[in-house]
């Protein structure tokens, strides 16, 4: 693959740079360098920025034109994400709707579903959350017990989801539920779309030691959704859910992975400023992190090429997820090495807040990245069994 821009790609890159220069200004610049995708302190400002993106069709830029998208090809999407990361723009607030649900809907949804939901995602009028994990079905998604029974023209949902990021902000949830009460494992599951604003749903925040609470428990007690709000066939939700996980493990994190380059560069600058770069071990660690982010970038592009050819990312997306999540966790540990004794300090008054700087955030948050979207142990099983064809792990 030739990574140099063609003349058309160079022109498009200039268009993106110009747009970001003209629009990522004023109060939006306060979001620069804010690396936490669930930043609650700036939520309203992030939504306002997302709506600016949506108005110019950068939300849904890969969608076909008939659904309001720009129909950008693979290389153009990569260019946009590169320039977005280079501008130090914030993580996307519509991650779950645009990054995970919309490509799944385009691949498996009915025409009426696409016409109903895609415009509201692009205009950032409806936010989404992901109803996968349960107390007894974390990495083992096929063990979900949340059930949905058909009652006339509606599904009645009962059960519990956990670690549901931004559920307290979402208007809709795409959830994996068991619609066949006699089924076990991945059979009898359906991919159901559930409105969050109704009496049958309770959202309980899971407050962390940092004071944030982007994760939630969600309880369904005779919650309802329309009969037609199933993506794919009833009972065939496993296939659809796996497609969503493919996007989550692969394309959805492309912009985030490109932003990792900024983090490495910033850490190298700190090492030069505080003298840590004179330490041979730390120099080697930083060089290894720099090389790793380049490997990650090219591997991500290889997966996206696979998406272009096949339409859906296969189990090889687990390679990318396993690599980048463990790389990022290691970068957080190396950031603490660079900071040295200063790593034990935080800004602000500890009695009033818990203001983490960017490197503290990387160190703490990156540890969860090896768990969500499928734990590293699960990714290794998928790679071994479905990519390399090794014998299945004993059950």
Image (cartoon, helix red, strand yellow):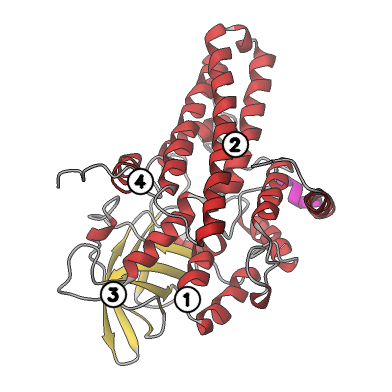
- CA separation, marks 4 and 1? 27 Å
Identity of the residue drawn at 33% across and 42% down = 388
Identity of the residue drawn at 17% across and 70% down = 183
Q: Nearer the viewer, mark 2 or mark 3?
A: 3
Side of 312 relative to 242 (left or right)? right
Q: Earlier in the sequence, mark 4 or mark 1?
A: 1
Q: Nearer the viewer, mark 4 or mark 1?
A: 4
Identity of the residue drawn at 22% across and 55% down = 136
Q: Earlier in the sequence, mark 3 or mark 1?
A: 1
Packing grade of label 4 (10 A; few <14, some 14-19, many >=20) is some
Packing grade of label 1 (10 A; few <14, some 14-19, many >=20) is some
Query: In this rendering, is residue 162 above or below 234?
Result: above
Residues at discs 4 and 1 in contact (Cβ within 8 Å): no
Range drawn in magenta? 26-30
Q: Secondary structure at mark 2?
A: helix
Q: Secondary structure at mark 1?
A: loop
The residue identified by callout 2 is 260
The residue identified by callout 4 is 387
Q: Earlier in the sequence, mark 1 or mark 2?
A: 1
- CA separation, marks 1 and 2? 33 Å
Packing grade of label 3 (10 A; few <14, some 14-19, many >=20) is some
The residue identified by callout 3 is 235
- CA separation, marks 2 and 3? 39 Å
Where is residue 175 drawn, in percent x and y? 37, 67
Where is residue 108 drawn, in percent x and y? 45, 72
- CA separation, marks 3 and 4? 26 Å
Query: Could you tell me if residue 209 is visible in this image?
Result: yes
- CA separation, marks 3 and 1? 15 Å
Identity of the residue drawn at 62% across and 7% down = 278
Q: Earlier in the sequence, mark 2 or mark 3?
A: 3
Q: Which label sits on residue 109?
A: 1
């Amino acid at each position: 693959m030739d990574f140099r821009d063609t003349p058309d790609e160079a022109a498009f890159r200039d268009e993106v740079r110009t747009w970001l220069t003209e629009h990522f200004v004023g109060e939006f610049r306060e979001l620069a360098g804010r690396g936490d995708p669930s930043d609650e302190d700036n939520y309203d400002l992030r939504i306002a920025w997302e709506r600016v993106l949506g108005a110019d069709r950068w939300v849904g830029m890969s969608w076909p034109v008939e659904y309001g998208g720009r129909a950008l090809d693979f290389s153009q999407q990569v260019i946009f994400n590169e320039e977005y990361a280079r501008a130090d723009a914030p993580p996307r607030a519509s991650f779950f709707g645009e990054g995970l649900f919309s490509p799944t809907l385009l691949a498996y949804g009915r025409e009426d579903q696409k016409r109903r939901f895609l415009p509201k995602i692009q205009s950032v009028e409806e936010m989404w959350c992901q109803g996968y994990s349960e107390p007894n079905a974390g990495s083992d998604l096929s063990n979900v017990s949340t059930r949905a029974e058909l009652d006339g023209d509606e599904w009645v949902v009962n059960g519990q989801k956990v670690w549901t990021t931004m559920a307290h902000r979402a208007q809709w949830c795409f959830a994996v539920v068991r619609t066949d009460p006699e089924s076990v494992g991945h059979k009898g599951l359906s991919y159901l779309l559930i409105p969050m604003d109704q009496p049958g749903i309770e959202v309980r925040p899971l407050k962390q030691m940092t004071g944030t609470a982007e994760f939630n428990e969600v309880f369904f007690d005779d919650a309802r959704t329309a009969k037609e709000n199933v993506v794919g066939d009833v009972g065939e939700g496993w296939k659809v859910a796996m497609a969503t996980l493919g996007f989550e493990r692969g394309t959805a994190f492309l912009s985030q992975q490109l932003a990792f380059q900024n983090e490495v560069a910033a850490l190298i600058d700190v090492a030069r400023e505080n003298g840590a770069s004179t330490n041979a071990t730390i120099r080697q660690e930083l060089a290894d992190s720099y090389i790793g982010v380049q490997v990650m970038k090219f591997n991500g592009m290889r997966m996206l090429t696979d998406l272009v050819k096949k339409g859906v990312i296969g189990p090889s997306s687990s390679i990318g997820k396993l690599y980048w999540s463990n790389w990022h966790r290691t970068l957080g540990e190396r950031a603490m090495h660079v900071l040295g004794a200063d790593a034990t300090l935080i800004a602000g008054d500890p009695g009033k807040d818990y203001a983490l700087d960017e490197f503290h955030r990387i160190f703490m948050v990156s540890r969860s990245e090896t768990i969500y979207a499928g734990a590293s142990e699960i990714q290794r099983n998928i790679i071994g069994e479905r990519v390399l064809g090794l014998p299945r792990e004993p059950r």
